Image: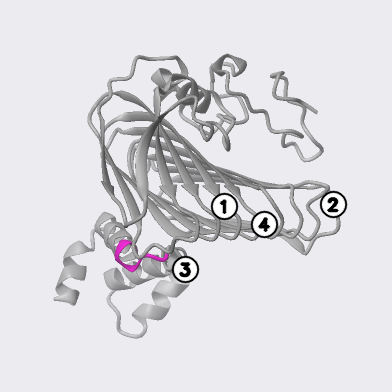
Amino acid sequence: MTTTTEREVVLGPTGSPAERFTSRNPDDFAVPRGREEEWRFTPTRNLGVAFAPFVPDNTMTHEQDLPEGVTVSLVDRDHPLFGAVLTPADRASALAMAQVRKALLVSIPGEAALDRPVVLRVTGEPGNNYGHIIVDVGRFATATVVLEHAGTATVLANVEVCVGDGAALNVVSVQSWDAGAIHLAAHAARVGRDASYRHSSVNLGGGIVRLVPTVSYAGPGGSAELLGIGFAGDDQHFESRLFVDHDQPNCRSRVLYKNALLGESARTVWIGDVRIRPDAVGTDTYEMNRNLLLSDGARADSVPNLEIETGNIVGAGHASATGRFDDLQLFYLQSRGIPEETARRLVVRGFFADVVNRIGLPELEQQIMTAIETRLGYAAETDSESA
C-alpha cells in the first residue's frame, strides 16, 4: 500500500487505489498529462495555468449575508484549522493550499440554530486566483451555508468543513459562472459523532468545473448525504469526483448525482469512490448517478467504486445509468393532450426534481429549476404560465 510520502500508486483488486495518495506538497504530484487515473477524463490541455504556481491576480470579490451569531474572518495559514480536514489528492488542490495567503473562516457557534442561511457570494473577473474557505460548526449547531459563484475567472480553491458532534450542516455550492470560467476545487468535510452533513453541488455555468467532495468521520453515528445537479451545454465540462471514507462504526452515507447534457460538445464526469475500512462495522452506504442525454454527441462518463474491507455492515451498493430522452414518458404525456414542448419540459423537471427538492431551500430550489428551464428554452412559456 502507498503512503503519503511516495508517489507510486499500487492498485487494489478492483483497479482502484488501495490507498488514496494525498500530500500538501505540489511537487509530490506529477504535472497531469491526461493519462493519470485522477485526470484521464479532464481536458488537461485547457488547464495549463492550473498546474504551475502563479502570482494571483486577486480578481475575486466576496459578499456575505450572515445570520446573527455567525462570524467571518480572514485567518493566516498557521491557524489550527487550516489544513486540519483536507490533505490534497491532486496537484491543483495542493497548489491552491501551498500558494494561498489567507483563508476565509466561517465560525458557527455551538448549539446555534440559525434562522436563515449563511450566504457567501464569490464574483470573479478575468484573472487567475487561489481561494480557501473553512467552515467550523460547533457541537449541536444547526446551520445552512450557501456558496454562490458567478462571473469569469480561473479559480483553484479548497473548502474545509468541520462538523462538530451532534451538529447538522447543509452546504450548497452553486456554480453559475459565465462561459469560459475555470473552477477547480476540493471540498472536504469531517463529520463528528452523531452529526449529519449534506453537501449539494449545483453546476450550471462555466467552461470547466471540477469539484472533488470528500467526507470522513470523526466518530461513530455520523451521516453524510452528497447531492449533485449538473446541466452541461456546448463547450462545458462538469466533473465531480467523490470520495467517502468510512473508518468509524455505524455511520451512513448516501450519494445522488444527476446530470443533463444538451449540445454536441457537452461533457459530464462522475466518479464515486466509497471505502469501508475494517473498523467501520455497521456501515450503511449507497451511491447513485443518473445522466440524461438530450442531444447527439453529448458524453457522460460514470464510474462508481466500492472498496469493502469488512463484511459486518448494514449495506453497501451503487447504481449508474446513462440514457437518452424517454420517448415512452413523452408519448404518455402527449396522449393526454399535453403539447410536445411542454411534455419535454415536464420530463426534465421530473428527472431533476428528487435531487432539487432535497436541497432544503425553497427559494434556491425554484431558482435552479428556472435556470434549467431557461437553458432548455422554456423560460417564456414558464413565465406565461405563472402570470
Which residues, given as a range, are shown in magenta? 360-364
Is residue 173 toward the left or the right of residue 242 in the image? left
Mark 4 touching mark 2, by CB under 8 A?
Answer: no
The amino acid type of the residue labelled 2 equals: Thr
Mark 4 or mark 2: which comes first in sequence?
Answer: 2
Element assignment for label 2: loop
The amino acid type of the residue labelled 1 equals: Gly
**Is residue 187 visible to the viewer in this orientation of the structure?**
yes
The amino acid type of the residue labelled 3 equals: Asp
Q: Position of residue 251 (x, y in %)?
A: 70, 58
Please name the residue that numbered disc 4 is placed on.
Answer: 318
Is residue 305 toward the left or the right of residue 257 in the image? right
Rendered view: 258 above or below 60: below
Please name the residue that numbered disc 1 is placed on.
Answer: 164
In the image, what residue occupies the spot 46% across and 44% down?
A: 135
The amino acid type of the residue labelled 4 equals: His
Please name the residue that numbered disc 3 is placed on.
Answer: 354
Q: Residues within 10 Å of mark 2 (few under 14, many from 20)?
A: some
Mark 3 touching mark 1, by CB under 8 A?
Answer: no
Image-quadrant location for residue 59: top left
Q: Nearer the viewer, residue 308 or 207?
A: 308
Whether residue 361 appears in magenta in the rendering, the answer is: yes
Mark 1 or mark 2: which comes first in sequence?
Answer: 1
Whether residue 345 appears in magenta in the rendering, the answer is: no
